[in-house]
Amino acid sequence: MTYLFLYFFGIASIWWVYRVGWTEALKTIFSVLIPSILIILFNVKAGRLIFKNPAVGIISVLPTAFFIYRGSKPLVYGINSWLDRKRNEFVDSQEIVDTEVISKEQA
């Protein structure tokens, strides 16, 4: 089942990169992946230490997920702005030469 999920995720990632480009795809992947990892890590660690009752742990997942998601927004925004700065530095590079293509029939 895990391999099926990873296969689907890989195909979806390739399609998304094809659709919107590398930088937009990375920004989207990071905006989903970072809060998800933080929520999972927090709930696993806190669930073992605080909640001995599984029902209390399940009820507490939603509020903690909301707060961790809102708390991770500055980190995600910082990574996305860094990716934008790197893309703009590449576009504004002096080593890039603009050319026009003229076919042999027009020349």
Image (cartoon, rainbow, N blue to C red):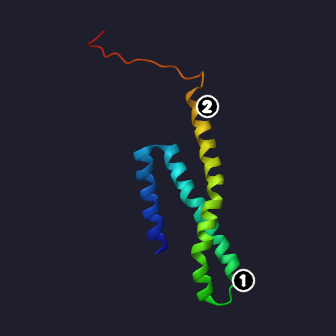
Task: Rate crowding at label 2 as few (under 14), some (14 to 19) or many (20 or more) other CA atoms within 10 Å.
Answer: few
Quick check: marks 1 and 2 in contact, CB under 8 Å?
A: no
Q: Amino acid at mark 2?
A: Glu
Q: Residue at x 54, y 59 (%)?
A: 32
Mark toward the start of the polypeptide (1 vs 2): 1
Q: CA distance from mark 1 to mark 2?
A: 47 Å
| Element marked by disc 1 | loop
Residue 61: mark: none
| Element marked by disc 2 | helix
Task: Rate crowding at label 1 as few (under 14), some (14 to 19) or many (20 or more) other CA atoms within 10 Å.
Answer: few
Q: Quadrant of the C terminus?
A: top left
Image spot of residue 36 (x, y percent): 58, 65
Residue most extreme to the left: 105
Residue 89: mark: 2
Q: Is residue 89 left or right of residue 28?
A: right
Q: Residue at x 59, y 67 (%)?
A: 66
Counting every numbered tag in the picture gives 2
Residue 50: mark: 1
Image spot of residue 77 (x, y percent): 61, 49
Q: Residue at x 59, y 70 (%)?
A: 65
